[in-house]
Amino acid sequence: MVIDEYRDINRELFFNDIIPRYRPCVFRGLCSAWPLVKKGRESSHGFAQYLLESSAGHHADVVDIFYAPPGADGRMHYNDAMNGFNFNKLKVPFSHCLERLLLAQRENPSPLIYMGSTPTEDLLPRLKHENPMTLLGNSIKPRLWLGGKTLVQPHYDVSDNIAVVVAGRRRFTLFPPDQIGNLYVGPIDVTPAGQPMSLVPINNPDLQKFPRYADAQKNKVVVELEPGDAIFIPSLWWHGVEGLESFNGLVNYWWKSSALANDDPYAALIHGVLTISSLPEPERHAWKAFFDHYVFQEGGHPLDHLPESARGVLSTMTPELQQLIRSYLYARMGIK
């Protein structure tokens, strides 16, 4: 699979042409003019100093980091019992996080230190204004990720995502959503950040242990990003992320394209596990037909033979109808 790359992109093209394709793509040099990127190209120490100056006195604020000793080899993964992970989650001052990452550059082998998905609005109030994401509106808030030579196993997000490399280099390994059965996913209720991860080491897969991964490899795409490059990852696309330098930084933006995105489809999936997965096989297949008809609408709108006014919960979705359906569900589940 080949990933599309652009060097000239604007908001109109992004929303009208790229998003509807539902495929990842790369925007080369999109954010090269950012002060944060320029500092990242100069040195890791200059980059860290810019972040501290942007923190406006908040560098003592506590952030979450993942930590593991050198034996983890930078790979963030489950533990052997599959009931936890090979790293610990710690709370440290932001300035301490930066200091520890800078020190780790000189350690060989180095420990796993990773600060992920940290909101910047309060911690780094200058960041958003000095480093604007021109493809998105101001309401979508940036998040900061820092680390060394770390590898995050393939996982997915339930939101659309633009990720910008601001220091170091990162390698992205992507798989379409329909490869879920070939990725040998870990437990869905034991996750580092909400979504489960693939068990297969992407740099050294064991095809005897994970034979279906051979089919996943036929559908994967791998791309490396330099500082200033950005990648668009649609929701539910699997992506593994590897830091290729001893110091790496990334800024990302999550949003949902639907204007009626207050509800979580993942919750519907878990509810389906609760209510349908243990039914006898013939009944499960019967429910699958109902879902295909009413939810996925594979044959078109299931009530297109009725006027809009008579379609009830299958009418065009509005905030009012959304609330009505939510209230109905709460009543069915006995939630007051």
Image (cartoon, rainbow, N blue to C red):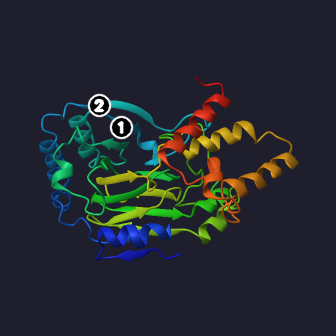
Please report contact status of discs 1 and 2: CB closer than 8 Å, yes or no.
Answer: yes
Residue 65, which numbered label?
1
Nearer-N-terminus badge (1/2): 1
Indicate the quadrant containing the C terminus: top left, top right, bottom left or bottom right.
top right
Residue 148, which numbered label?
none
Q: How many marks on residues?
A: 2
Residue 255 located left or right of residue 297: left
Q: Nearer the viewer, residue 31 or 309?
A: 309
Residue 291 percent coordinates (x, y): 72, 52
Say if residue 263 shows up in the picture.
Answer: no
Q: Amino acid at mark 1?
A: Ile
> To which residue does mark 2 refer?
92
Residue 207 located left or right of residue 28: right
Q: Is residue 190 above or below residue 144?
A: above
Q: Is residue 333 above or below residue 189?
A: above
In this view, which residue lies farthest toward the top? 336
